Amino acid sequence: MAQNQSAPDTTRRSERSRRAIYDAALALVAEVGYPKTTIEGIASRAGVGKQTIYRWWPSKADVLLEAFLDLADQAARAAGAADRQPYAIPDTGDLAADLKAVLRATVDELRDPGFEAPSRALAAEGLVNEELGRRFVAKLLEPQLQLYVDRLRAAQDTGDIRADVDPRIALELFVSPLAQRWLQHTGPISHDYTDTLVDYALNGLAPR
């Protein structure tokens, strides 16, 4: 009597399908934009049935946001969080150097075609689709901005910036100009540019 064969590894198969769906969603939104990206198109490109997608996500917005969050998580792990510990802006004791380092990494990420295209598509759609925009901000942008808040609060504890500074407003001195340049193509983004933003911001934040 033949031995029973091992049961299929459904967990591994599901993970393969999930990754294929992520890749398909990100590729499609970059190629055709958010409005023309459909569940059917994602399913076809991923080689799965659309019911598979609907079983895991209620809408294309949910697929795209989760795919993009996964992409951001991969970038964080590649930047040194491979142990999957929560990422934090390094605190070397040199606030300017720490901010410059993380902003340089951000520039590299924003200029990476694999990240830029889906990020720009989702950001643009979020401007006209309020519900999607709110979720994009809440799930991705706010957690990233909180990292700056935490680092600036640590700098307040060491006296590197004034105690009366609001970190949430202060971070916008270097984060917002970068975002505007990138989104609206008002100028080139580079390491020199973000280094200068930090220098300008911290000169205004230095203890009086």
Image: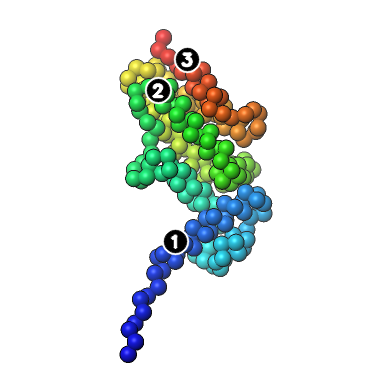
Q: Which residue is disc 2 drawn over? A: 95
Residue shown at 34% from the left, 45% from the top: 83
Q: CA distance from mark 1 to mark 3?
A: 48 Å
Q: Are marks 2 and 3 in contact (CB under 8 Å)?
A: no
Q: Earlier in the sequence, mark 1 or mark 3?
A: 1
Q: Which residue is disc 3 drawn over? A: 203
Residue shown at 37% from the left, 45% from the top: 82
Q: Which residue is disc 1 drawn over? A: 15
Q: Is residue 147 above or below residue 67?
A: above
Q: In front: 126, or 97?
A: 97
The image shows residue 149 at horizontal and vertical percentages of 41, 29
Q: Are marks 1 and 2 in contact (CB under 8 Å)?
A: no
Q: In front: 58, or 151?
A: 151
Residue shown at 56% from the left, 68% from the top: 49
User: Dividing the image into 4 quarters, which one contains the N terminus?
Assistant: bottom left
Left or right for 164, reference 105: left
